[in-house]
Amino acid sequence: MTRILHVLDHSIPLHSGYTFRTLSILREQRKLGWETFHLTTPKHTAPSEAEETVDGWHFYRTLVSPVERKSLPGLGELRMMKQIEARLQDVAERVKPDLLHAHSPVLNAIPALRVGKRLGIPVVYEVRAFWEDAAVDHGSTAEGSARYRLTRWLETRALRGADHVFTICEGLRTDIVARGIPSARVTVIPNAVDIESFDTGGVADLSLKAELGLTNKTVIGFIGSFYAYEGLDLLLDALPRMLTLLPDVRVLLVGGGPQDDALKAQARALGVSDKVIFTGRVPHAQVQRYYDLIDVLAYPRHSMRLTELVTPLKPLEAMAQGRLLVASDVGGHKELIRHRETGLLFKAGSAESLAQTIVDLVQSKDEWPRLRAAGRRFVEAERNWTASIANYRQPYQSVLDAQTEATRAA
């Protein structure tokens, strides 16, 4: 039985697209007969012990004190990598894995490569997004800055050092190969859904609808984290245009994040505060109730390297539920959404295009059943986790075979 030690940025009980993808990977790998072990880094901020079990999954944690978390830029990352390396070596010596599988960011990959070399364990690296591009969106650096170039160099170094590279989409794969990584050493494990977890035809909770002031309204919604790259500011900019043609339209924003205050201020400045409902974060078990209130899901991501290269998970979840969706035509969306077949795409960055696309969709209700059914068929046939995770098999085996040959030769 192949034993795999996964090195993860964070995990459940925290909820994010990162943790949901991780759980899907682990579940399907277990089905394939592999034994998985799981280590999280100091960026897992939920209160925890050195080891804990969450929903039946056992995690090794890398614990640091609150004082240790505070540091100057750069020094904090170096300290974190040393902490991860020490904890990873300890766990690897205990569980004796056949393979180290480091997941983004590169802060996890560098320690894994060091420990792998020291213990003679092959290392694979899975890129879900590039750390330097995420830093640009968070405002901690600018594209082309010295820090950006240094981080990109570190990322490329990790890619070259790994025995194999996995990534989540063709956009990222193209970028990785362009850095000089042989294409045969890069495999896409595409984002997918657990189709059995999603039902179509959910019925709106009328009491919740009334509580939020959405009775007899057309609801345009977004459920998730409020990051700048998600483009929710564009959705608010488009709302006054939509209201001129669809007076009963309302925007429902479920979640929270760094842009929360800015979005509320923007709604006030536009004079549409009474047309935008901010629910705040809701318990995961309640999320489906809010999905069932929404007529059209909006994914208005801005165009930047992160969104052009990376495919998100949420549009797939929407299609799995047979939902209507409108999304910007960034590369990450175009890799998932077939315009006017499984959803509608609009010109990224254009509030006018977004508004008109939503108006056209709302006024074409005869098209709704076809769009909903096509989206569901797409994820059933092409984006299910069983098919996606099966793509690990051949690369894993090649890496392990190469390790066996190297050991024999030594």
Image (cartoon, helix red, strand yellow):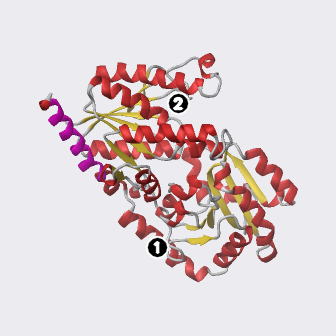
Amino acid bearing label 2: His
Quadrant in the rendering for residue 26: top left
Q: Position of residue 110 (x, y in %)?
A: 43, 31
Residues at badges 2 and 1 in contact (C-beta under 8 Å)?
A: no
- Residue situated in front as seen by the camera: 145 or 296: 145
Left or right: 157 in relation to 331: left
- Residue situated in front as seen by the camera: 197 or 315: 315
- Residue situated in front as seen by the camera: 4 or 223: 4
- Residue situated in front as seen by the camera: 173 or 361: 173
Given the current orientation, which residue lies at the most extreme left position? 408
Where residue 373 is drawn, which disc sits there? Answer: 1
Amino acid bearing label 1: Ala
Left or right: 161 in relation to 205: left
**Circle 2 SS class:** loop
Magenta range is 391-407
**Is residue 28 located in the magenta-colored stretch of the structure?**
no
Q: Position of residue 257 (x, y in %)?
A: 67, 43
Mark 1 Cα shell of 10 Å, populated few (<14), some (14-19), many (≥20):
some
